[in-house]
Amino acid sequence: MPTLEFDHQLIERYDLSGPRYTSYPTAVQFSEAFGIEDYQEQVALSNQSGRPLSLYFHLPFCDTICFYCACNKIVTKNRKRAQPYLDSLYQEMTLQAELFDSSRKVDQLHWGGGTPTFISHQQMRELMEHTRKYFNLHDDDRGEYSIEIDPREANSETISLLRELGFNRLSLGVQDVDATVQKAVNRIQSVEQTAEVINAARDTGFHSVSVDLIYGLPHQTEASFEQTLETVLELNPDRLSVFNYAHLPEMFKTQRQIDASALPTAKTKLAILENCINTLTDAGYAYIGMDHFAKPDDELAVAQTNGSLYRNFQGYSTHANCDLLGLGVTSIGMVNDSYSQNHRGIDDYTESLANNQLPVFRGITLNEDDKLRRRVITELICNFKLDKQAIEKEYQIQFDKYFQEAMQQLVTMQADQLVDISNTHIQVTPKGSLFIRNICMAFDFYLKQASNRFSKVI
């Protein structure tokens, strides 16, 4: 697991826009030329592998809007809107279950949003009952079953129910505990609400608790965010994700409600990030990569140590061997050698299912070059090293010749002490770990076509 070194001059030079590589190729390359028949073909090939499954359920509803949010969500006070959506979700499960081999175990399951706990306790029970009806869930606690929690929409009773239903990991949105910042982004959330959820998770035997923070929000300062970190560390989460806020009001209308003049300067953001990294590593957390930190005995840290860490649409993961099935509006799946995405609009999604059709509307089938580059990028972004000889053997290539252009870029990075390159390996240095997205971008075939579609890497 890497340590980090800060070099402000290099950060200024390398602070470009680029993907977060939750997939390669990224969603920018998805096409509507990929249709339902293509998806069905990939599922059939997937069934031959016998790989376990990962299920992602998108529950898009939120009671209130957080101004920084770039997620696909439906903001409403009307809780009755959830049931028609769940009925569509059950229909989608029916259609998907007909395609997948029923013997395939679900090793990973995740409810995301939106706010998954927007739905009632009874609806939570029904959703899990339908899932168990159509898919082969673990009956013990071996699966990695996780859920995103808004502490304003959950209490100890909710957490107890989720544990009963089989969930054993949760992530909490906190973002910032400062009252001025919370008001500016329309997310008023007390520390007591957050603590109640975390304490309930520990009392009921959840395996892992993760807290999400965001730096770069309006009115944040070095001092205010340091106080947020100190407050959160007292809650002792197993993992932390500290995301860089990307202010893109031209893409996300909700962000137009943020006062851009109140955003911290680039210099202040960088100081916040540096202080955050120092504070968390001093507190004993391992830097996993990009925005993620974990206790050394956490599964993510252990997986990185033994070289089995993976990355998908939910971020870093320990289940590289799963095919990912995305359920719900806008969900993305990764099945066999393909990515597929459901309709992004609720009307199109429900209409497809009302017509007994899968709601897949675009995707991509990976070619051999895509699969090779995905392997290289995944190894680097997860494990900070790459065995060139292993890649050559697996893909029957001469690495330096095949990636001649990328290696030329890495020569410059080696001169900047971001990577060490030998005849057999690429090793990311402690200084280079902060620039892992830049390093991966050297291997991205499509990047020149879409570099303006991504957030800044630092």
Image (spheres, rainbow, N blue to C red):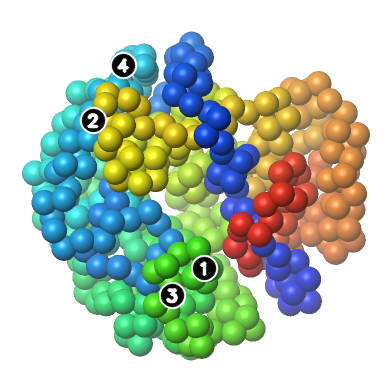
Q: Is residue 31 or residue 431 the one in the foreground?
A: 31
Q: Amino acid at mark 4?
A: Glu
Q: Which residue position holds label 3?
A: 256
Answer with mark 3 or mark 2, whichever residue precedes in sequence.
3
Label 4 Cα neighbours within 10 Å, binned few <14 / some 14-19 / many ≥20: few
Quarter location, residue 56: top left
Q: Is residue 388 left or right of residue 207?
A: right
Q: Nearer the viewer, mark 3 or mark 2?
A: 2
Q: Nearer the viewer, mark 2 or mark 4?
A: 2
Q: Is residue 240 left or right of residue 199?
A: right
Q: Nearer the viewer, mark 4 or mark 1?
A: 1
Secondary structure under the numbered disc 3 in the rendered image: helix
Residue 25 rendering spot, x and y as whole percentages: 63, 39
Residue, x 59% and y 27% (percent of image)?
365
Q: Is residue 149 left or right of residue 13?
A: left
Residues at marks 3 and 2, CA–CA distance in whole angstroms: 35 Å
Label 1 Cα neighbours within 10 Å, binned few <14 / some 14-19 / many ≥20: few
Q: Is residue 417 or residue 175 the one in the foreground?
A: 175
Answer with mark 4 or mark 1, whichever residue precedes in sequence.
4
- CB under 8 Å between callouts 2 and 4? no
Residues at marks 3 and 1, CA–CA distance in whole angstroms: 8 Å
Q: Which residue position holds label 4?
A: 98
Q: Is residue 344 or residue 230 the one in the foreground?
A: 344
Answer with mark 4 or mark 3, whichever residue precedes in sequence.
4
- CB under 8 Å between callouts 3 and 1? no
Q: Which residue position holds label 2?
A: 354
Residues at marks 4 and 1, CA–CA distance in whole angstroms: 41 Å
Q: Which residue position holds label 1?
A: 250
Residues at marks 1 and 2, CA–CA distance in whole angstroms: 33 Å
